[in-house]
Image: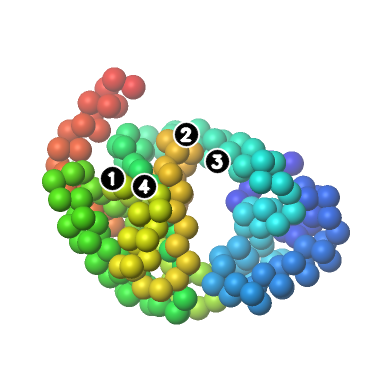
Amino acid sequence: MKLKTWMTSEEIASIANKHTRTIERRRDKIIKETPDIDWFRMKSKPYKYHMNFLEEFVSPIVFDLLDRNRQLSNTIACMHRTDSLEQHLSFLEWDYFVTISYKDSLSSKRCFSAMSELYEKVEAYSFSGDCRMFFTTEPFSNRKGYHNHLVLRMSADTKTVTRFIEKYAPIGRVDVKPYDHELAGVFYTAKDKHRNDDWDILGNKLTEEGIQIEKNRKSA
C-alpha cells in the first residue's frame, strides 16, 4: 500500500495490523485528551486519519522509516514543480520545521499576525546573523480556529528555539524539528498557499538570497 498523508481507518488498521474498532477507540481517546491535535478530519465521512496517528500503534523506529519513505517520495514529486516559489526556497538553508497548534481558537488574521510578530523577535535575537521564516496559516480539520506551519532559519539549538517560540507566540503546542533537506518541509508548508493568501516569507537578507538561489540552481 502506498503511504498517504491522510488515510481511512481501514487503511490505518491494515498498516498497524489492528481492528478498525481499536483505531476508532484510540482516536476518540486522543481527541478527548488533546483536543487541539490535528490528526483527524471529521467534518465529513469517511473520517480521515493523519499518518502521524500511526505512532500510536507501531514502534518509533518503524514509524520513522515509514514516514521518511513517504516524505522522500513527496520530495521527489515536488521537485518536478519547476520555477515554483517552494522549489526556489528549497535551495536555501533552513534550520527548523515548526508546527504551532494554539490552545485558543484563533482567527486566520490573528495567526498570521502572530507569525509576523514572532519573526520580529527572531530578527532581534539574531542581530547580524541570517534569519528567515516561511510560514502558512491554515484551519484545523477537527475544530474551530487556525494553526501555523513554518520553516525557520535561526542560529540556536532546538531547546532554545522551542522555548523562544513558546515565549513569544500565543499559548499552544509547539513542535520543533531540525530541518532535513531530504524531506519536504518547504513543500509541506507551501501546500495550501495556492488556495489562500495566508502565507508569507520574511527575512533579513532576501535580496542577497535571491541571487544565491540562482547560483545554486545553475550549479545543481
How far apart are the alpha carbons under marks 2 and 3?
Answer: 8 Å
Q: In the image, which is nearer the foreground, mark 3 or mark 1?
A: 1
Q: Which residue is mark 2?
A: 182
Q: Which residue is mark 4?
A: 157
- Type of residue at label 4? Asp
Q: Nearer the viewer, residue 69 or 88?
A: 69
Counting residues from the start of the chain, the first of labels 2 and 4 encountered is 4
As rendered, which of 21 and 4 lies closer to the eye?
21
Tag 1 and tag 4, C-beta contact below 8 Å: no
The reply to whether discs 4 and 3 touch (Cβ–Cβ < 8 Å) is no
- Image-quadrant location for residue 13: bottom right
Res 197 → quadrant: bottom left
Residue contact between numbered discs 2 and 3, judged by CB atoms under 8 Å: yes
Residue lying at 20% horizontally and 61% vertically, measured from the top left: 120
Instruction: Give the residue number, with chain letter if any, for mark 1.
Output: 155
Give percent across and percent down for residue 199.
32, 59
Which one is in front in this view, the residue at disc 2 or the one at disc 1?
1
